[in-house]
Image: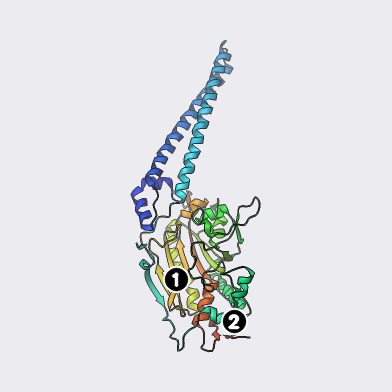
Amino acid sequence: MLDLNFVVNNKEKVLENNLNRGVYIDVDKIEKLSIERKDLIKKININREKKNKISKEIGILIKSSDLDKKKKISKFQDEIKTEKEETKKLEEALIKIEKEINLKLEKMPNILHESTPLGKEESNNVEIKRYLEPRKFKFEPKDHVEIGTALDILDFERSAKITGSRFVVKKGLGSKLSRALFNFMIDTHVDINEYTEVSMPYIVNGKSLHGTGQFPKFKEDVFKLEIKDKDWYLNPTAEVPTINYYRGEIINQKLPIKYVSFTTAFRSEAGSAGKDTRGMMRVHQFDKVELIQFTKPENSYIALEEMLLHAETILKKLKLPYRVLKLCSSEVGFSMTKTYDIEVYIPSQKKYREIASISNSGDFQARRSGIRYKNNLGKTEFVHTLNGSGLPIGRTLIAILENYQNEDGTVEVPDELRKYLGVEVIEKE
């Protein structure tokens, strides 16, 4: 969430930022409410000072020998009662205005970093680098659904029977390959990239989702658990529980803090009907390794570049062709200031598809979640939070099946996974 004073004192910047993101929020209304809020606070403080002054007068009268003190005290007490009633009305009005301000601020996206390119659509994203040329097949490559079904390692029909569309059952070497990827990714990020592994709950509460910016804007994309008296939801990404690990705290350990977390994530994908629904590209339940960092403000954009390299490490080790994009203004997520996307090459589609996002939210999430630290001068500041895919298991599995496929339907196992998987080739058992 943006700071109210920042919004009011930087109206033109905020308006331009919202315009670049394709969002309209009435900043003039926020400014008007801010002025009313200050006026109410001033009146409340004046009333409190009056009340305190009268209370002191009563104290003096009680100790005095004034023959008329009972009458005077009674009059003062009536005045205190009047001040209390007036103050209560003012405080109620203040609460109402602050609630209205917060509702507007909650819907306002983060300020884009100056290096984020401007653009109104996906085509305005800027490609900054590539790794490996896509393989040139001597046959027409199959998609992961055909490959996985023929090898009997992916089952989409029975998963639909069990639950519904956009779920998958992984079996045999399909399941083992997913487990191999999970172990390989975690080991790489812990042993090479120096993250600390954490295992987070798969269920989160509404405050956690609000803290990272999923609520209220993206509430329809989250599965709610209908349990009496519980504000519980299925976790949409490890970003939510991991960022909220420090919610409402002043972090008293050295920054940066680097966590890698594996979770099964759940998304309703409410806004993506009819888009990428074949196979595992866009499912309701998926496994994902997530990278999270808590940093000092002055170091967060250095950390962003490092996290991009950490995510790239996985694809390089797996020898999968990919490209990196700097997202344009309209494509950067609500809570983020700057985002890189990594797209892996998918042979059956003959194009690159998103496999990872690496983003910096600045102090936006920390401000919503109340996560702070003490700087070198002992002053309390909000930390900066960053998150990145490191990587999703399903989409990495898709990329392996398609890029390492053979004409006979078998799939070569990348060198880095052979010690985890125990085989060099995936073939039908």
Q: What quarter of the picture does the C terminus occupy?
A: bottom right
Residue for badge 2: 419
| Extreme-top residue of the structure | 67
Residue for badge 1: 342
Q: Is residue 374 visible?
A: no
Three-letter amino acid code of the residue under disc 1: Ile
Provide residue 10's location: percent of width, then percent of height. Answer: 36, 48
Sequence order check: which comes first, mark 2 or mark 1? 1
Instruction: State the separation of the CA atoms marked 2 and 1.
Output: 26 Å
| Extreme-right residue of the structure | 228
Q: Quadrant of residue 359?
A: bottom left
- Compare residues 64 and 107 and report the one nearer the observer: 107
Provide residue 357's location: percent of width, then percent of height. Answer: 46, 66
Q: Secondary structure at mark 2?
A: helix
**Which residue lies at the image location 42% right of the left edge and 37% below the top edge?**
36
Q: What colour-coding does the image apply?
A: rainbow
Q: Is residue 33 visible?
A: yes
Q: Indicate left or right for 282 with 29 as reference.
A: right
